[in-house]
Image (tube, rainbow, N blue to C red):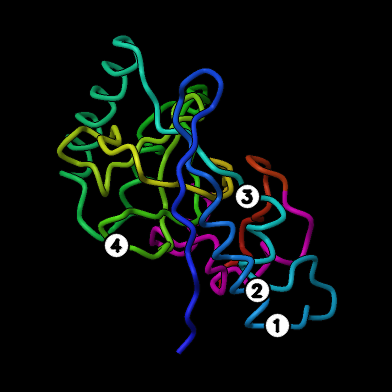
Amino acid sequence: MLKLKIDTTMGMTDNNIQVATPTIKSYLLQLKRLMKRKKPEGWHYSSMEDLLLQEGKSYALGPFDEANRVTIYELYNHLCDYHGTPKPKQCYYNSQTALMTLHPSQDRLRYVEGYALSPNIGIPIPHGFLTFDQKVVDFTWYRDSFGIVSERNVEYYGIEIHRADIAEALIDTEMAQSHLDNWWADWHLYKNKFTNNERYYIEGQGV
């Protein structure tokens, strides 16, 4: 059994928006070193850890002003009207369907996939969540607070998946898929250089 030492120190940015120090990044780095996966021929990244370490970033935990909080509450209610109350342990479904309820011009809301770390869990776990103006909105872990993270010592880290890629994957596979666990697209995410919030998925790549 692998034993990884996790650093859970927290930090503050200059504008007092709290951002976790990269404990998830440290975890991913240790995983990459321990697994020692060889990069497949023709691939740009050797593994999920390699992709996240090169292209991922940490995301801030608010605060939101009153106007933005109202917007997020309205989005939550809109999600519930169309798809029902967000479901526990269904982070990809909750986040992707929430994004799809908005008009494509609403670029302030984005879908991120990576890892989250809560002191209640103690180890980073794969997670899909949203950001509003680059600040975390999590309809899975924080349903009772309408998606606004109520704790201060939670860390979020990941990559931004383009809205159109999410929409096409939902149609092709008829499921809310993990884009990092990219088997259903023949691992296409790992074969080319990835740029946050730019297209990577082509219709029909799904298996």
Sooner in the amino-acid sequence: mark 4 or mark 3: 3
Q: In the rendered structure, which segment of residues is drawn in magenta?
A: 166-194
To which residue does mark 4 refer?
Answer: 121
Circle 1 packing at 10 Å, graded few (<14), some (14-19), many (20+), is: few
Q: Residue flagged by tag 2: what amino acid is it?
A: Lys
Residue annotated with mark 2: 32
- Give the residue type that dot 4 points to: Ile
In reply to whether residue 173 is colored magenta, the answer given is: yes
Q: Position of residue 72 (x, y in %)?
A: 30, 24
Instruction: Find numbered disc 3 in the image and state the secondary structure of the residue it sits on.
Output: loop
In percent of the image, x 58 and y 48: which residue is there? 159
Residue occupied by mark 3: 56
Q: CA distance from mark 4 to mark 2?
A: 21 Å
Disc 1 is placed on an element classified as loop
Residue drawn at the location 35% of the way across and 34% of the way down: 101
Q: Earlier in the sequence, mark 4 or mark 2?
A: 2
Secondary element type, mark 2: helix
- Seen in the picture, residue 63 relative to 195 is either above or below; the reply is above
Residue where numbered disc 1 is placed: 36
Front residue of 118 and 90 = 118
Which numbered mark, 2 or 3, is in the foreground of this view? 2
Q: Position of residue 200 (x, y in %)?
A: 68, 52
79 lies left or right of 56: left
Are dots 4 and 1 in contact, CB under 8 Å? no
Distance of label 3 from label 1 (alpha carbons): 20 Å
Alpha carbons under labels 2 and 3: distance apart: 14 Å
First in sequence: mark 3 or mark 1?
A: 1
Marks 2 and 1, Cα distance to the nearest angstrom? Answer: 6 Å
Q: Amino acid at mark 3?
A: Gly
Residue pictured at 39% horizontal, 65% vertical = 123
* Residue 172 covered by magenta stretch: yes
